[in-house]
Amino acid sequence: MRQCRTVHPVRADRVDVQQMAHVVIGERLDVPDVQVSRVVHDDVEAAGLVENLITQLSAFIRWLTDEGAAKPVSELVGAAQLDPDLAHAWSQSYAQPRRELARVRMRTAQEQGQLRHDADLDIIVDQLWGACYHRLLVLRVPFDDTLAERLVDQALYGATPRTT
């Protein structure tokens, strides 16, 4: 089990955030979106890149909405802005490994010709998951059932007209 440590003394106003950090970062690293990403990555031949990314992103959205992670994630991200140890723990224990799962799948897509070889994988990840975090943390608007599909479509195909 990984644990989030802080060098700051525990104060009453930090207890909840620290407890959430232990749960979300430490004990719940096998959250559904990471599990689904690993399964989908392991089965890359069965699904194309679009379907794979929609599956990964949909699982993340479900984790936030249906499984109740939105509030603790919002609070953790907020607290991490003021606590470098928490920020490091969140990044190293969740955000970076999650990001790498998406990049691994996209590298496979590049090798299979499903994605341009010069595509910036970090930017694509930022477009997809960053949009979800923006909706969650800044806009505070609900997620709908079509969001993952629409985000993947825009990230991979853009807003220009499609040629047939």
Image: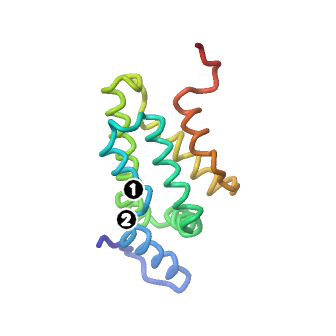
Residue 60, x across and y down, in percent: 50, 55
Q: Residue at x 51, y 79 (%)?
A: 14
Q: Residue at x 54, y 37 (%)?
A: 152
Q: State yes or no: discs 2 and 1 in contact (Cβ < 8 Å).
A: yes
Tell me the residue that label 2 is attached to: 29
Dividing the picture into quarters, in which one does residue 21 lie? bottom left
Quarter of the image for residue 140 reads bottom right
Return the residue at label 1.
Answer: 34
Tell how many labels.
Answer: 2
Q: Residue furthest bottom?
A: 12
Question: In this image, 58 relative to 31: left or right?
Answer: right
Q: Earlier in the sequence, mark 2 or mark 1?
A: 2
Q: Is residue 13 above or below residue 65?
A: below
Q: Which mark is residue 161?
A: none
For the residue marked with disc 2, what is the amino acid? Leu
Front residue of this view, candidates 14 and 21:
21
Q: Amino acid at mark 1?
A: Val
Q: Residue at x 34, y 51 (%)?
A: 39
Q: Provide the secondary structure element on which disc 1 rests.
A: helix
Viewer-closest of 100 and 39: 39
Q: In the image, is residue 159 above or below residue 24?
A: above
Q: Residues within 10 Å of mark 1 (few under 14, many from 20)?
A: many
Horizontal relation, residue 55 to residue 108: left or right = right
- Work out which quarter of the rendered image holds the N terminus and state it: bottom left
Nearer to me, 61 or 47: 47
Residue at screen point 32% across, 26% down: 112
Q: Is residue 40 above or below residue 163?
A: below
Q: Position of residue 91 (x, y in %)?
A: 40, 57
Q: Residue 146 location in percent, x, y? A: 63, 45
What is the residue that sits farthest to the top in this orientation? 164
Q: Give the Cα distance between marks 2 and 1.
A: 8 Å
